[in-house]
Every structure is written in structure tokens, then in C-alpha cells.
Image (spheres, rainbow, N blue to C red):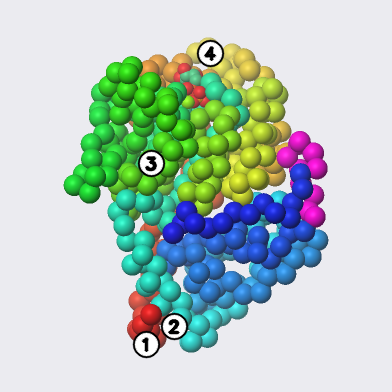
Amino acid sequence: MIGEIPRTFDGFVETSNRGRYHRSMVTEATVRTALANVIDPELHTDIVDLGMVGEISISDTIATIGLALTIASCPMRGQIESDIIRRVTAVPGIEVVHIVTSVMSQEQRSTLMGRARLRARETATPTAVNPATRVIAVSSGKGGVGKSSLSANIALAIADQGHSVGLMDADIWGFSAPRILGAGEDRLEANEDRKIVPTVAHGIHLVSTGLLLDDEDTALMWRGLMLTKAVEQFLKDVAWPNDLGYLVIDMPPGTGDVQMALARLLPQAEIVVVTTPQVAAQKVAARVADMAKRSHMPIVGVVENMAGFTTESGEHYDIFGSGGGETLADDLGVPLLGSVPIDPLVASGGDRGHPIIIEHPGSAAAVAITAVAERITEVLPPLALDNCVGRLGALLDEIPVVSN
Ligand SMILES: Nc1ncnc2c1ncn2[C@@H]1O[C@H](COP(=O)(O)OP(=O)(O)O)[C@@H](O)[C@H]1O
Ligand SMILES: [Mg+2]
């Protein structure tokens, strides 16, 4: 179901290569499509399908959206509204979002519950990624900036907060997640439904081509496979746990194909851009941002990696320059989620399967990564958990069961 949401790019023209778009005509349908990626945290169904989206009007770069809430006082409201804002401002041509809220009538609520029940049945498959799983695609324009190191350590830091976390290594040829998580010797197996079961490394549910290959020949066979096919298989044929709160995706460097496939298959995916403090790296990262705009994937924020080195005696060296992360975040209008310093423990820990977050949680780099993970879960709080106690129960008590 989630893979079928159309992503239309009609109506926009790209007028420069700097990631800026000028609106020729943003249609209501485009905004509605973007809204179809906002999932109600409790009902686990998108707000368009649930009938929560009312009138949409667009004037210049401003979108005004009618939102019908089930209960006005529900604390989930803030989350739904901030998800709407991030999704709709990711539509090229829209800069400002106004939300006009109203409260549903009894009849509307009863229809909503009918839809929610129907969808709950349809999506009750243990294989696909649950639509309520937050998906974070860790991207950058080029290799070697620390995507894989950060993906693994951010996954661990989010798991430390008590969430169930998956890591999908979408770098099909250049896989490195198994080594970093010390699972290099593990091999993936299929369950009775012939779905691939993720291996569990340091508590993280991990899938990577590195866990499929046994020899160079198999590696060559995989090389013949289309990149996007492999990613598709990782999303469709893997028995991802149904209660996965977060799925971190370690993206391959620079390819647009995988990102577009991801946008198509996992509409809830959002991007974290990794850059080094260098201006050159930042330019490459800006291309990722451009891709994000085109695929309608919101950018959660920027992480600056390899931001300076401090010696034991306290001397600080900006080896790869400074300020690139801040500048990129400003350019993109997204938060700088944090700056992670150069620390040899990141590299040696990754080589030995002893991630720095676990082995040296007090090190400056681990502290910075933990802070980044906190920022991420602040911006993207878990959807799979029931934060709004009793809302669903109250609704069920209060309305008659509708049949479909
Ligand atoms: N903050 C850091 N401090 C020291 N070394 C790092 C840091 N981040 C990444 N590295 C090292 O840099 C190299 C490239 O990192 P990697 O995570 O593989 O990047 P990417 O996935 O973007 O290609 C690896 O050897 C890794 O251990
Ligand atoms: Mg990598």
C-alpha cells in the first residue's frame, strides 16, 4: 500500500542548479500527496486516508490546510501538525504552511475508525516496514564522510533511548555496517515465510549484502543486480519487526537512483545529511538536499562529521576546515543536528566491531553522536508507541462499529 502513493513532480520547474525551485503551479493534488505521508501516530494510517484533511488552498508560496482532529485536546495534535509542516514545506514551491484545525463530528469519527480498522487489517503483515516506523536515510553526496560510522552509532544511540531500531545497509557494493557492528561473520537466514530475518547486532536489527555474501563469486553476482532491486528486496522481503520504532538507512554515496527508489517504497523516509566542515564536501551534500526536494523527502537536519581534532593536551586542530555544517544547515533552512569531532576511536572501533557509543560512551565523539540522536528523536518522536493514552479506547467506546 505505502509503495503506491504517487509522487508527482508535475507543475514545477527547476530554474537553477542550486536546489532552488520556482513555483509555476503547485497543485492541491501535490500537497495532498505530500500529506498522504503524514501518519496518525495512533491509528497508523495516513491522515488523508483517514479523512482528516479538509480544504487545501494555495496562494503563492503559502499552503493553507484544513485539519480535522478526532479530539481537540489530544496531545498527538502537535506531532501531526509538525509532521504536516515538514512534509508540505518539502514540496518545491511551498514555503509557509498554515493549519486550520477543526474537530470531527461523530459521524466523521465513525468513518475514520472504519478506515483505520480496514487499514490495520491490510497492513498487518510482519514483512514490510510498518508505516509507523520512522525512517532516517543517512545521506551525503560523496563517500568517506562518515555516513556508515554515523548510521551505526546513531542507531545504537537511538536504541539506548529504549527504542527498537533497525539498520539497513543500502550501500549494496560498499557495505560496511556488518563490520562496524561486529556482525561480519553473521549470515542472514530466511524464516518459514521465506522472508529474510535481520541479524541482531548489539541490539540493532541489521540487514546488509555483507551478510549474504560468502565469496567473491556471490559478490559478483550481486554486482549484476540492479541497485534499486536490491534495496527493494531489503524492504519487501525482510521480516522487519513490526514494532520497529526507527529504521536507519546507511545510504550509498551520491546515487540518485537509490534515493528515488526509497522515496517510492518508503514514503515516510526522511533524510539526515552528513557533511564534513569543508566547503567542497558541503557543495556535494547540497546535491543530496536537491535530490531530497525532488523526491519530496524532508530533511531532518545536517550532521557535521570530522569537525576538528583535539589532542590529549587540549590543542584543537580544524583539520578539514570549519563551519561547513552550519552553512549548509542555514542554506537548507534545517537544523544543524550536531558536530562530531575526529576521534581515532570512531575508526578503530568501527574496524573491530566495537562501536564508540558502546565502548567509549564518554568520549567527545560519542557524546556528540548521542546528542545528534536525541535531536533526531526530538524532531521525529516515535510513532509506534501509544502516547495518547485512551484516545483510541475512548473513540471505540463512544461510536458504533461500522462495517465496510
Ligand atoms: N568522527 C570520525 N573520527 C575519526 N574517523 C572517522 C570519523 N567518522 C568516520 N571516520 C572514519 O572515516 C572513514 C570513512 O567513514 P565511513 O563511515 O565509512 O564513511 P562513508 O560511509 O560516508 O563512506 C572510516 O575509516 C571511518 O572509520
Ligand atoms: Mg559507507
Sequence-earlier tag: 3 or 4? 3
Instruction: Let me know if residue 161 appears in the view.
Output: no
Residue occupying the point 53% across, 47% down: 263
Q: Which disc is residue 233 wearing? A: 3
Region in magenta: 15-24
Q: Which disc is residue 110 wearing? A: 2
The quarter of the rendered structure image containing the C terminus is bottom left
Magenta-drawn stretch, dominant element (helix, strand or loop) = loop
Q: Amino acid at mark 1?
A: Pro
Q: Give the x, y percent position of residue 188.
A: 26, 34
**Helix, strand or loop under label 1:** loop
Is residue 22 a member of the stretch shown in magenta? yes
**Pointer 1 and pointer 2: residues touching (CB < 8 Å)?**
yes
Q: Amino acid at mark 3?
A: Gln
Residue beneath label 1, please? 400
User: Mark 1 or mark 4: which is in front?
Assistant: 1
Residue beneath label 4, please? 311
Q: Label 1 crowding class (10 Å Cα cut-off): few <14, some 14-19, many 20+?
A: few
The quarter of the rendered structure image containing the N terminus is bottom left
Residue occupying the point 48% across, 40% down: 373
